[in-house]
Amino acid sequence: SASRLDAQSLIAFSPEVAAARDAGRPIVALESTIISHGMPYPQNVQTAREVEAIVREHGAVPATIAVLDGRIRIGLDDEQLELLGRSPDAMKLSRRDLPFALSAHRIGATTVAATMICAHLAGIEVFVTGGIGGVHRGAETSFDISADLQELARTPVAVVCAGAKSILDLPLTLEYLETHGVPVISVGQDHFAAFYTRDSGLKADFRMDDAAQQAAFLRTKWALGLAGGAVISNPVPVSDEMPAVRIQGFIEQALAEAQAGGISGKAVTPYLLARIKDLSGGASLVTNIALVKHNAKVGTALAVALNQQR
Amino acid sequence: SASRLDAQSLIAFSPEVAAARDAGRPIVALESTIISHGMPYPQNVQTAREVEAIVREHGAVPATIAVLDGRIRIGLDDEQLELLGRSPDAMKLSRRDLPFALSAHRIGATTVAATMICAHLAGIEVFVTGGIGGVHRGAETSFDISADLQELARTPVAVVCAGAKSILDLPLTLEYLETHGVPVISVGQDHFAAFYTRDSGLKADFRMDDAAQQAAFLRTKWALGLAGGAVISNPVPVSDEMPAVRIQGFIEQALAEAQAGGISGKAVTPYLLARIKDLSGGASLVTNIALVKHNAKVGTALAVALNQQR
Amino acid sequence: SASRLDAQSLIAFSPEVAAARDAGRPIVALESTIISHGMPYPQNVQTAREVEAIVREHGAVPATIAVLDGRIRIGLDDEQLELLGRSPDAMKLSRRDLPFALSAHRIGATTVAATMICAHLAGIEVFVTGGIGGVHRGAETSFDISADLQELARTPVAVVCAGAKSILDLPLTLEYLETHGVPVISVGQDHFAAFYTRDSGLKADFRMDDAAQQAAFLRTKWALGLAGGAVISNPVPVSDEMPAVRIQGFIEQALAEAQAGGISGKAVTPYLLARIKDLSGGASLVTNIALVKHNAKVGTALAVALNQQR
Ligand SMILES: [Mn+2]
Ligand SMILES: [Mn+2]
Ligand SMILES: [Mn+2]
């Protein structure tokens, strides 16, 4: 063909993000799986807008990322966000799927791994999400380990999250990250966060409450040429936390039901999350929204600090 | 020493491959372990010639790869192929062994991992083989996982194969590839192929029957700078497939005999393959040759399509 | 800020190392965890000096590596070595921790992984230590695998060691290295060394008794652009070896006591090493010092040979 394919021809920036890039302003990447798969319409679109507004309020520009019309979209306009919010059959893209959604012109929402890749291609250093994937319970025999962890080991993006859901095996997740040299930095407490609850009971590698501290760490890491990103574990605010005993009970009940119902393999995680939402009478969704908004605040502060330490 | 060692001084192209490179023609890499370790002489040399002929017939240039006289040979002449075919003590080279065969001037046949490395050094994007290595049965406790899988995660070469042998643990192999972001693309069916049989019972990530589709996917992946290759799973033709129950029986019998005979560790795989060949009265070898030839056709079409989409 | 952070601004060379670099002389990196965590003061500082002297005697310049005052120190002066030797609370730095010790201005001793990173940043190709980390016993379920192994897979530094301690799972350690394409080269024997004893009972990938052979292998590997380093397994001299039955007994006793005492997780390894030292009446420390000195000789010969084959 006449024109050679390159990364930049596969990326399209929204006017807002393009202007921020030109002006050298801080930008925060946001994922889109939470929109297409995490919440029902229209709550998903509304929440996405609210999260974007929080980023703007605190001094950065939000860049929600998805694949539409054969391009990686860095920043979605109203129509695109609406389209994604109404497409529950959007592909859920990880590293292996990203080229497919582009070459086959499919609608795709980006997971943690794929959002990290796209953010890095777009020159964005901070990415805000709910929780990272991890080592699944039973991975000793199933080898079911999220591609998010390998992505953290190779792609230089800081992932601001509320830790990882305790339907995963959190001790094994931290061991895997340690083996692969991925730093886990906790904000406001010593322990790693457990998504619905603040305390996983497991120590993070470092505690850094200040965005300037976090930024200095990252600038040093990347100046050394050390591959990969970092987990910024930001616990759900106390007021939005689910009671640990309650969520633990839901998880154990859901796990028991999954086993009794013969649910296995890739069907387990979506089943567990749906059951937890039902069992909690929707409370898990409220907590999920609250923690993402809190992460947006913390992630924006980090993006601003990184910009100041450029 | 007077001249600094560099990659190009360690590589020697055959006249046919050198001419193809100069002319910008599509090239297909072929491995040599199948010649030195996979089949008896002179069947191995004859099969290698026939596979090369299929590549030429379909519009590309074959490049059989091996290490001879301290050089990586990209394309073997008659004498070199004969030498390799008569050297059952040739080293079987994986990533860790490749520099040794070169620096110690040993004869070496390249496995999937080493052929990928050499193909990439030679600027070749498509490599045709029988089957890839994978996660071995019992790897939960033995940690026996082929270096081929890590190679697929880092070296940008498409590996056209008939899936992986079912003496391996195929579900764990697919999980491992997923964790490391390696796409598994199936040709002509939805499921991952199981070498001697068409259907492993496991879904591949994508189905792409057309070479143009496969090429567009790969061009997109590599344009994004995404490390690694892809598995192109091309099932053995229906007419050459072994009956699933029959091959499964051989595998179980061979596994039982291995255990009863106290065969363990690295001795298990060669033992199983030899027993399967004997138990099948040589039928497994016939299937093996048929599937490699079929892969050569599919791989050549892919190389041609990649050349058109350059 | 006025000046952009870069790797070179984070590294400080001692006058001796700086002069060696300017003169193109061979340099051998030495780690500092053995000083801060491996031995009591003043034995640690004295041993460090003696190891450095061995490197000088055999024709290279030693570069002991640590983090002090926000800089990676390549070569320590008397005052710095003394400071490190008297700081038992120095951080033990692996890949994930290195940026923290720098950005937070902490005293840090470098493990195998972090020393490899720093050596590579400083352009040093050979690193001498006691033993590498590995796959821990029980890692099938604990996932406790040292970050040293991933570092060997990505950072181009030869690590001269006496193998790995048999408190680790050595068969699984070798499988893991094989999967990740890391060559294990044995010196003077065919088998992999087991730190306190010469023979792990496990075959290494290659035996290369001559430094020139080892250097030719490494030059070839790196000329090909193959990522990562190599394990140079140099067994403890016969005269300094601990009796295999005796050390095995200590290890089993220590393991049993750890289990009985409810010691688990990250506390296990330091507990085992301390118990082995006590149970052996200090003999394990004597062996440890002897093998490091022997490694310094072998590592220096390798550095000299690599320099000749530049
Ligand atoms: Mn999975
Ligand atoms: Mn193996
Ligand atoms: Mn560990």
Image (cartoon, coloured by chain):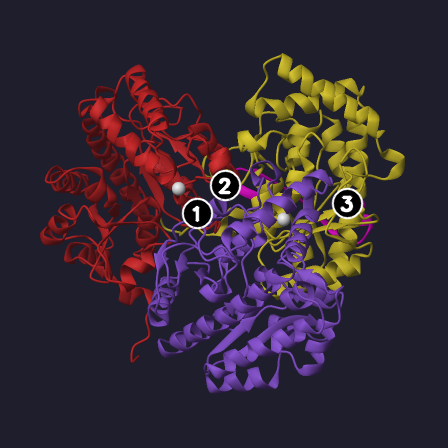
Chain colours: A purple, B yellow, C red
The image position of residue A160, as x and y in percent, is 48, 65
Left or right: B7 in relation to A308: right
Residue nearest the observer in this picture, B190 or A284: A284
Q: Residue C157 at x, y = what percent?
A: 36, 47
Distance, label 2 to label 1, CA atoms, is 8 Å
Pinpoint the chain carrying mark 1.
C
The earlier-in-sequence mark between 2 and 1 is 2
Query: In the rendered image of this protein, does residue C282 appear above or below residue C113?
Result: above
Residue at image coords 35%, 23%: C256
Disc 3 to disc 1, how far (Cα)? 33 Å
B172 w.r.t. C235: above or below: below
Query: Which quarter is ligand 2 in?
Result: top right
Q: Amino acid at mark 2?
A: Gly
Q: Quadrant of residue B75?
A: top right
Residue at image location 10% in from the left, 40% down from the top: C42
Instruction: Using the image, determine if residue C260 lies above or below residue A215.
Output: above
What chain is tagged by disc 2?
C
Asked if residue B106 can be seen in this view, the reply is yes
- Residue B106 belongs to the span the image colors magenta: no
Q: Tell me the CA gap for discs 2 and 3.
A: 27 Å
Q: Is the residue under label 1 in contact with that under label 2 (CB below 8 Å)?
A: yes
Tell me the element at label 1.
loop
Which label lies toward us, 3 or 1?
A: 1
Q: Label 1: which residue?
A: C228
Does the Cβ of the disc 1 residue fall within 8 Å of ligand 2? no
Which element is circle 3 on?
helix
Judge whether residue B70 is colored magenta. yes
